[in-house]
Amino acid sequence: MSSKPLVLDADGTLLRTDMLLEGIWQGLGQDPAATFKAFSLIGDRAAFKAEIARIAPLRVDLLPVNAQIAAMALDARESGREVAIASASDISLVKPLADHYGIERVFASQDGVNLKGQAKADALVAAYGEAGFDYAGNDKSDRKIWDHADQAIVVGSAGGGAKGLDRVIKVEGGWSPKAVLKAMRPHQWVKNVLLFLPMIAAHAFFLDTFLAVCLGIVSFSAAASCIYIVNDLLDIEADRLHVKKCKRPFAAGTVPIPIGMMACAALGVIALGIALMLSGQMFGVVAFYMALSLAYSLRLKRMRWIDIMVLASLYTLRVVAGAAASGVDASVFMLIFIFPVFVSLGCVKRMTELALAKDENPLPGRGYARRDMGDLLNMSAVGMVGALVIFFLYSYSDQALSLYPDQWLMWVALAPIAGWLYRMIRLGYMGQMDYDPIVFAMSDIRGIGYLMITLSLLFYAAGLWSEWFTRFFG
């Protein structure tokens, strides 16, 4: 076993993340103007890193750690070896990280010096001598340090930087496509079945309409995943404080931030490309959805009540997108009806989070605490009553009378709609559902029963059941 000092890189080695990128994204979430202004210093890497660290100081105790490297450092300390951290990150971040893990010696970027590559190698050779230390790193630039170290500890592939080295210890690192897919939250794509609503409401049951809506769902799913990644990058620290969200890929460090950024860009291109292929209107809807979602992630989600209205708008935009993709006109009454439904579900989402919270403190990154449960319950009830009243008024419209000749069945359909909304509100208030009510609704057997009864009654009111029976069996 070596008795020489063990020197650890921080970003991507001891940590399963990059502190500079974490700081940039946290800065974008907390103070976007100052963060964008800091990019004017990017030509001076050391000054840029110092400014980002000033704008967005990180909680080093929450940063995900590479368990193998941490164990290696602990073994080294217990055997009497010196353990040090040598990082290109700013000293204001690296020093607290070292203190948190009981590491006394620190090498980091400071005083205008960006401690990376050759600069780091020179500093370590000056401190320990040629081949006087073992070094753990993960990047191609670390090759310049490994060339002067006694033993190279390589995390992941290191971009091929360890090729040809003699004394090498390999440590598992990197990421998996499965983890990237998880970051895209494919389970959330189920919400995009809302794009089928205009087609169903207009009784436009045609193959070309169906296929167009399916393409629209692909576009919207890519757009939503793009924004989910942005949201997770902006909320990394808040997610790490959350009982469940701490397991998300970026919060847990299972997907590197640069990989997430590349996936985000690719998804955005796919979303807008497919939307443009469908129609100019669809492109506009998807672009607006992404812009509003970004505004929500950056600022609006922290604003009480505004966040719920924006959530309801984002759900409603899915219905508008369904109309734009298929070419079917979305009824104004339908949009007016579903908006208060989604206001109720937005309140349900917040009530669920509060019901499952561990204490009375405000939700991380949100403007609500448990004292707001009553107000959220009242608002959800207002949304429910508003939706039912609007649906009843719609039954008297010329469009409804032409589409649903048996008007009284529309009134009967109010019962299962009310039952479903009441169930969602009650379960949310009691914390007995998923954090996203739409995702929960797609797997809730009893709730699906309410929705199927509603659809059946509406189809009967429209005379569709008898039409289909005659077509297939007559």
Image (cartoon, grey):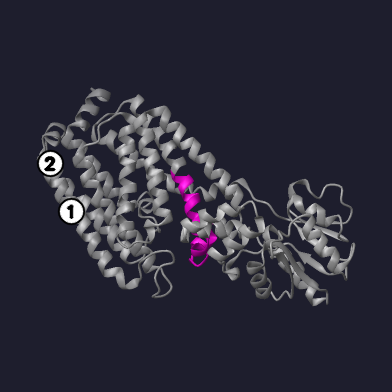
Where residue 410 sits, quadrant-wise, is top left
Q: Nearer the viewer, mark 1 or mark 2?
A: 1
Report if residue 56 is visible in the image.
no
Considering depth in this image, is 116 or 461 the residue closer to the camera?
116
Please report the residue visible at 54 percent of the width from the left and 60 percent of the height from the top: 247
What span is colored magenta in the figure? 224-248
Where residue 151 sits, quadrant-wise, is bottom right
Q: Is 457 in the magenta?
A: no
Amino acid at dot 2 = Ser
Q: Position of residue 90 (x, y in %)?
A: 65, 64
> Label 2 near label 1: C-beta < 8 Å?
no
Q: Answer few, some or many: residues within 10 Å of disc 1's Cα (few below 14, many 20 plus, some between 14 and 19).
A: some
Q: Main secondary structure of the magenta part?
A: helix
Judged from the image, the secondary structure of the residue bearing numbered disc 2 is loop
Give the mark nearest the N terminus, 1 or 2.
Answer: 1
Which residue in the protein does label 2 denote? 395
Q: Quadrant of the C terminus?
A: top left
Judged from the image, the secondary structure of the residue bearing numbered disc 1 is helix
> Distance between the Cα atoms at labels 1 and 2?
14 Å
Considering depth in this image, is 261 or 407 the residue closer to the camera?
261
Q: Left or right: where does residue 153 sit relative to residue 270? A: right
Which residue in the protein does label 1 denote? 386
Classify 139 as above or below 73: above
Classify 283 as above or below 414: above
